[in-house]
Image (cartoon, rainbow, N blue to C red):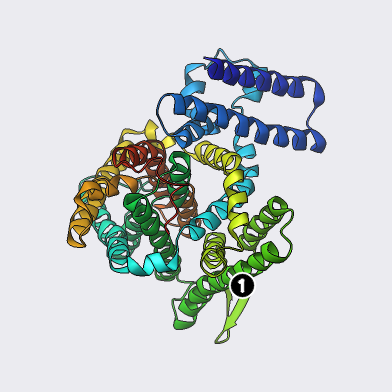
Amino acid sequence: MQILLSLITLIIVTLLTLTLRQADLGDGAAVRLAITCMTVGFVMIGAWLTGRLFDRWKLPKISGYLLFGLVVGPSFWSVLIEPMLAGYVDSVASGVLPLVPREQVEGMRFIKDLAISLIAITAGGEIQIKWLAGQFRRVATLTFAAVFVVGAIVAGVVALASLAFPVVPLADGATLGATEMAVLVVVIGLIASGNSPAVAIALMSELRADGPLSRTTLAVTVCKDLVIVVLFATLLAVGKGLLDENTAVSGHFLLAVGAELGGSILIGVVTGFVMGWFVTHVEQHLVFFIVGACFLFALLGEQHPHLTIGGEDHAIHLHPLLIALAAGLVMRNFQPDETEPLFHTIEHMSLPVYAVFFAVAGAELNLDVFTSVAAVLGVVTVLLARALAVWGAITLTGRWVGLEAAWRGKLWLCLIPQAGVTLALATLAYETFESTAWAKGLLSLLLGLVAVHALVGPIAYRWALISSGEAGQGDGGSAH
């Protein structure tokens, strides 16, 4: 009850502050900056309180973070609340609601990028090469099944279902050719095959989980994300070349894609050794150093240097996720003892990072898709196809590679959650194919898919970890 009262008090105080700002303070640059800072604090504290409330109810804290972000974000307000209060909301209230408007969500995306880098360093540091080498056949086979088999099944279901009804809404009067349909279903299948390393790390840390299920989940999740990022970058490049007559798919074009992926990993490896040297020789101000490193990774992701290959000029897009993963992997495997203080510092920073990351991810979720019966039917189709594909592919593959019967039936539940990385891929797909008749429908479908998986997935994952007996067995699930 005390937590709920604190949460209500926080919301009331924030509402009063925003109302005062609109009524008396104007809208200058200094005021906007102050409001942004207040919004970050409001999101962090509100998400933390909601997470504690969910923990009391035996639910994942990160589900509380996500739900808080969704409720105070723009989509929940515009889709569910505003229509019910039409005619009853005065001008002052309409100016301060939602509490986190779309422009503030956009402004906090860079903070989320910093959090992704921090989580990726942790994910890279949780996998030890020696352990992975010993489990290579299992992890590689499960990763193949989770990416290619699941992706192929979902893509096939979408293609077949599209013969009966529009799984992806199209612009008025538009039709799809064979090439467009092929690119569309492959994009959906590949994104549907992904899951969230952030959720995996956060829940293992929250439950202090360790054991074969936790380790296998984390290894498959990290390896799968690496494969998906590589495949997705290649798919977008090839797909754009096939659909855009101004973009030719050539050997030089594919070399440029390889350069940005290889360049991201190389930068991460170099950065990992530099970070290890800092921890070994300086050993001070690690919090500021870690934040600075994550800021650098996020900033690198905003840069688009140009590379000339065979006389053609190509923009290279670096991937902060790959950079941070490689850095964490290098530090854990080549300087494990020296960098242990850095990983302990990251662990102590994790609570506010997870709260902000998942709350912003919740605020980004779009509920517009659930206002249309046809769009809901498309989301439900992909949801069912993905759930059945993940269950079938992972369960059968787990039996084939000899996973222990006590937990192999629960592994598929651990691969259900989706969150920030999937949102980023969905947005990137929309931006790449924005000129097509299906881009908006694709984005709407994928955002609906992520919304359901982000809220339901952590609950399934938490149940799997607890029922397997691995909760409380370690220090956060390190795969070593």
- Which amino acid lies under the numbered mark 1 shown in the image of this protein? Val
Few, some or many residues within 10 Å of mark 1 (<14, 14–19, 20+): some
Q: Residue at x 45, y 71 (%)?
A: 245
Picture layout, residue 460 above or below residue 213: above
Q: Is residue 86 above or below residue 454?
A: above
Q: Is residue 255 left or right of residue 335?
A: left
Quarter occupied by residue 324: bottom right
Residue at 58% x, 21% y is 7
Q: Find residue 217 and report its horizontal and vertical position in percent.
A: 35, 53
| Left or right of 83, for residue 386 | left
Q: Position of residue 225 (x, y in %)?
A: 42, 59
Residue 158 horizontal/vertical position (percent): 26, 52
Q: Nearer the viewer, residue 218 or 417?
A: 218
Q: Is residue 177 visible?
A: no
Q: Quadrant of residue 433?
A: bottom left
Q: Residue at x 53, y 63 (%)?
A: 332
Where disc 1 sits, the SS reads helix
Picture layout, residue 46 above or below residue 458: above
* Residue under pointer 1: 270
Residue at 58%, 58% in the rendered image: 340
Q: Is residue 263 visible?
A: yes
Residue sticking out furthest to the bottom: 310
